[in-house]
């Protein structure tokens, strides 16, 4: 019987054969290597997105009935891991800042209509997290979990650490959301730095398209936590204005400052979900 090797287990040979630069052979080696770097970074990002969406889907499932005795802590583990993986995604965008503009300009035409905006996994992630004005599957699951414990999100926010694992879950949800937002804004800044006001390769309006899609998830949770500053209070209805300061025109100022510094369906377990 043949012993399983590291290379066989990870399909290393296949994995390392998936980078196929489209730059012509007449181009310099520097340009070919720059496109190879571009491909590796995006392929790695898709792999991390796969793990992130799997983990967030599992976190949402753990917060959805029927509940097991360890589901609260299990959901917390998945959320905490996702927070770290979003840091990895963010650092990969930072690494792309080492892509020379002159080399990117040379191979970019060969991308044809390929664009990161076409990433199916990113759309799955967006449905899980929701946006600045609409809650996603994760928050709805958290609401149901607090109700299962005879509480509410507002009460969890008001009680803080006294709410135990529910409070830690609320914190972790915001850690995930903030990591997601930071990753998106850093990518926006990079694209602005590299292509300016040019249209995207997929036919989008480029930076403007990206800016309009930078969202800060869990607006209701943020609003309820903010009410802690007012002391005990009755839960108020959503205003839809929790993240008005994140409008694209305001994000443009954020991007400029960064560059100047250098740089309602059922969700019972077993049911199929988009995420």
Image (cartoon, helix red, strand yellow):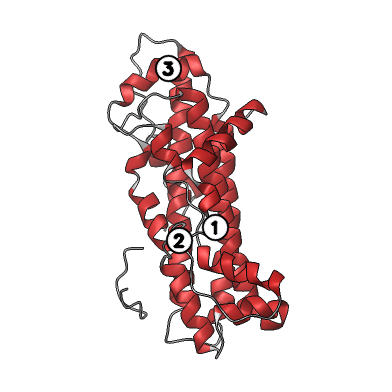
Residue 56 numbered mark, or none: none
Sooner in the amino-acid sequence: mark 3 or mark 1 = 3
Residue 228: % across, % down: 68, 72
Would residue 109 appear left or right of 68 to someone viewing this image? left
Residue 177 numbered mark, or none: 1
Q: Residue 269 appears in which quarter of the rendering?
A: bottom left
Would residue 275 appear left or right of 237 to someone viewing this image? left
Task: For the C terminus, give its image quadrant.
Answer: bottom left
Please indicate, yes or no, whether residue 13 appears anywhere in the rendered image: no
Q: CA distance from mark 3 to mark 1?
A: 33 Å
Whether residue 147 is situated above or below residue 31 in the rendered picture: below
The residue to which callout 3 is attached is 105
Residue 224: % across, % down: 59, 71
The residue to which callout 2 is attached is 129
In the structure shown, which secondary structural element does the residue marked by tag 3 occupy? helix
Task: For the N terminus, give its image quadrant.
Answer: bottom left
Q: Residue 175 appears in which quarter of the rendering?
A: bottom right
Q: Answer few, some or many: residues within 10 Å of disc 3's Cα (few below 14, many 20 plus, some between 14 and 19).
A: few
């Amino acid at each position: 019987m043949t012993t399983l090797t590291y290379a066989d287990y990870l399909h290393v040979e296949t994995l390392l054969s998936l980078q196929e630069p489209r730059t012509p052979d007449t181009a310099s080696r520097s340009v070919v290597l720059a496109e190879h770097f571009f491909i590796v970074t995006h392929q790695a990002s898709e792999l991390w997105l796969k793990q992130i969406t799997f983990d967030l889907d599992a976190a949402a499932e753990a917060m959805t009935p029927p509940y097991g005795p360890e589901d609260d802590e299990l959901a917390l583990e998945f959320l905490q891991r996702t927070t770290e993986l979003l840091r990895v995604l963010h650092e990969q965008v930072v690494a792309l800042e080492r892509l020379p503009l002159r080399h990117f300009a040379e191979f970019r035409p060969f991308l044809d209509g390929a664009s990161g905006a076409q990433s199916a996994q990113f759309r799955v992630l967006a449905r899980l997290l929701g946006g600045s004005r609409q809650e996603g599957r994760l928050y709805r699951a958290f609401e149901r979990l607090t109700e299962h414990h005879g509480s509410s999100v507002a009460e969890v926010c008001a009680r803080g650490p006294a709410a135990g694992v529910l409070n830690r879950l609320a914190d972790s949800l915001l850690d995930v959301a903030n990591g997601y937002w930071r990753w998106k804004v850093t990518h926006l800044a990079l694209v602005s730095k590299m292509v300016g006001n040019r249209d995207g390769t997929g036919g989008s309006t480029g930076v403007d398209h990206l800016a309009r899609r930078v969202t800060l998830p869990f607006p209701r949770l943020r609003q309820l936590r903010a009410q802690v500053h007012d002391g005990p209070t009755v839960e108020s209805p959503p205003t839809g204005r929790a993240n008005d300061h994140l409008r694209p025109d305001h994000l443009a100022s954020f991007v400029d400052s960064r560059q100047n510094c250098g740089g309602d369906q059922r969700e019972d377990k077993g049911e199929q979900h988009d995420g």
